Image (tube, helix red, strand yellow):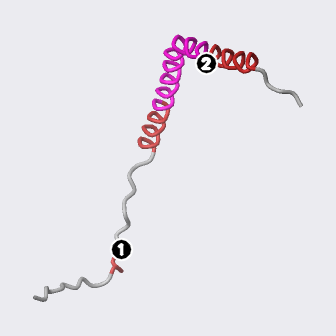
Amino acid sequence: MQMASLTGLIRIIVIFLAVYYGLRFIMRFLAPYFMRYMSKKFEQKVREQYKQTQQNQSKTPPKQKPKDDKLGEYIDYEEID
């Protein structure tokens, strides 16, 4: 069984911190481009859905309910105090 040395532990901590701060530094520059890309994709999807709903609404006329005389009698209820 091997014992972990103090220098090995410090080395791992330094590597972890270097990777963490390196990614943080890189993301500071890449995040605006990524957000712009995602917002454009979202906007395209919304526009596409809007066009589809506009086309569907223009193609189908509003449905009219058939007049049905078999609805029954109207009963006028009185309030009880």
As rendered, which of 78 and 16 lies closer to the eye? Answer: 16
Does the stretch in magenta take in 26?
Answer: yes
Which residue sits at x=65%, y=16%?
A: 19
Report the amino acid beneath label 2: Tyr
**Whole-percent x and y of residue 78?**
14, 86
**Whole-percent x and y of residue 36?**
49, 18
Dot 1: few (<14), some (14–19), or many (≥20) neighbours within 10 Å? few
Which residue sits at x=72%, y=15%?
A: 11
Report the amino acid beneath label 1: Asp
Mark 1 / mark 2, whichever is N-terminal = 2
Q: Residue furthest left?
A: 81
**Whole-percent x and y of residue 32?**
49, 15
Relative vertical location of residue 58 with respect to residue 19 in this rendering, above or below: below
As rendered, which of 38 and 52 lies closer to the eye? Answer: 38
Quadrant where the N terminus is found in the figure: top right
6 on left or right of 42: right
- Span shown in magenta: 21-47
Dot 2: few (<14), some (14–19), or many (≥20) neighbours within 10 Å? few
Q: Quadrant of residue 4?
A: top right
As rendered, which of 55 and 27 lies closer to the eye? Answer: 27
Per the picture, the main secondary structure of the magenta-coloured stretch is helix
Mark 1 and mark 2 in contact? Answer it, CB < 8 Å: no
Q: Residue furthest bottom?
A: 80
From the viewer's perspective, is the residue at label 1 or at label 2 nearer?
2
Dot 1 lies on which element?
loop
Which residue sits at x=50%, y=21%?
A: 35
Residue located beneath label 2 in the image: 20
The Cα atoms of the two marked residues, 1 and 2, are separated by: 71 Å
Which residue sits at x=61%, y=12%?
A: 22
Residue located beneath label 1 in the image: 68
